[in-house]
Image: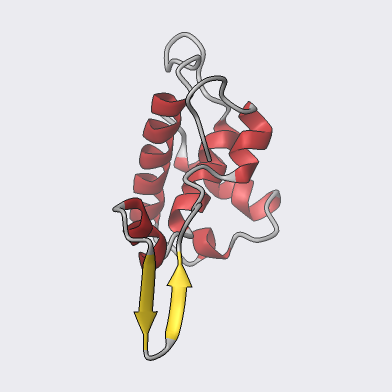
Amino acid sequence: MVDLNRANTYFTNDVLHNEEWVITDNSTRQRALVSAETQLYRLFRIYQPDIRPLPEEAVFEQALWLLGMDETVRKSEQGVKAVSVSGLSITMDGIRRISPEVIAILGRRVGRYVD
């Protein structure tokens, strides 16, 4: 499991756009790290916790990505394609589930992964 203190140090020292991390409490940060790690192990099956762990930076970046998702993005994951309120419309095709930084760190999956 990824260490919250190392994640805090990473976002403080190495990440320019870290606002979502900074404004979040430690309990939520820890849940984001656990969720990110779970997602990445499910998608990138060449990594296994005891044999070949994920790079910490990949988990950190995915956690930040998850914290940055607003209600609109979460709804798109549940199948909502568009939202319209008082003439303002948002179309949500092609929302990325995985952070581009994670893809840069881990590389693209071969096979079924589409994002």
The outermost residue toward the top is: 51
Is 28 positioned to the left or the right of 113 in the image?
left
At which x and y percent is residue 79?
31, 54
Vertical arrangement, residue 12 with respect to residue 36, above or below: below
Residue sitting at 53 percent across and 41 percent down?
Answer: 115
Q: Position of residue 70 (x, y in %)?
A: 41, 65
Residue drawn at the location 47% of the way across and 25% of the way down: 112
Residue at (50, 19) in percent of width and height:
53
71 w.r.t. 15: above or below? below
Q: Quadrant of the N terminus?
A: top left
Residue positioned 69% across, 51% down in the render: 13
Colouring scheme applied when the structure was drawn:
secondary structure
| Residue occupying the far bottom of the picture | 86
As drawn, 87 above or below 63: below
Q: What is the x, y in percent for residue 47? A: 49, 17
> Could you tell me how many numbered marks the image carries?
0
Work out whether residue 46 or residue 85 is closer to the camera in this orientation and state it. 85
